[in-house]
Amino acid sequence: MSRIGIIVALPAEAKCLYSEKLKVGLPIEIQQDVFLCLSGIGHESALHAAKKLVALKVDALISWGVAGAIDKSVNAGDVILASSIINEENRYSISEDWLSRISEHFIPSEPNIFNGDIASSKEICASITDKQHLLQKTKALAVDMESAAIAEIATANNLDLLVIRTISDDADTAIPEAILKHTNNLGQPRIFNFMLSCIMKPNQIREISSLASGYKKGLSSLSEIAEVLKDRHFLYSDS
């Protein structure tokens, strides 16, 4: 059977696939020939995790988790099966046969599932203006911070690639200062500074509540599709 490596940035995203606590950067076999690695947020973190999975001689990589919408046609809870990944330097292709199998299996279905490009940025796309500029530049549906790094490693090692992301924040939702400055590489708040930021700028609380609601929807969709994909070995075939 072919071997698959899955990279997730955040513990909550990993729990959609595996209930036990993971150590950052340490891949674990969650079922036969399926390996999961918690990377932490960002390009460099994902790059490191992808290299760890390559060392396990996987045949394919999956970028799994949530993303932020930059196009208003997608909303919190929607699923994007990326048709390509775009960053400042490159456009990375997804394995067409694998994408086709996934798409055909889930359409029509709930939650809403879209095929489209995902932009991958080394910097957080935090403001509504940032999202609008990125949309104009890339015409992508959403943005994340890890998929380009995973795609880079997949391309360099001639591995199949799939990117599955659910939307956690809409195109008209900004990421407030408390989250930008006072959470760690696993998205966990540094409680004292986080709370102090909220007290000093209470207008953030509404934005944080909106983000939390959208994140919950995104995780719910991830959990829903995870059960099907795990049972079917992620619909992957290297034949």
Image (cartoon, helix red, strand yellow):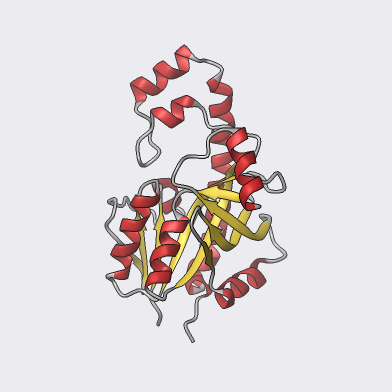
Relative to 153, residue 135 above or below: above
Q: Nearer the viewer, residue 205 or 222?
A: 205
Q: What is the residue that sits farthest to the top in this orientation?
A: 200
Is residue 112 visible in the rendered image? The answer is yes
The image quarter in which residue 72 lies: top right
The image quarter in which residue 61 lies: bottom left
Q: Residue 203: where, in percent of width, then height?
A: 56, 17
Q: Residue at x 55, y 41 (%)?
A: 216
Q: Residue 198: where, in percent of width, then height?
A: 46, 18
Q: What is the residue that sits farthest to the front in this orientation?
A: 89
Q: Residue at x 67, y 46 (%)?
A: 71
Q: Residue at x 54, y 21 (%)?
A: 205
Relative to 43, residue 1 above or below: below
Q: Residue 234: where, in percent of width, then height?
A: 50, 70
Q: Nearer the viewer, residue 71 or 98?
A: 71
The image quarter in which residue 181 lies: top left
* Quarter the N terminus occupies: bottom left
Q: Residue at x 58, y 78 (%)?
A: 97
Q: Nearer the viewer, residue 19 or 174?
A: 174
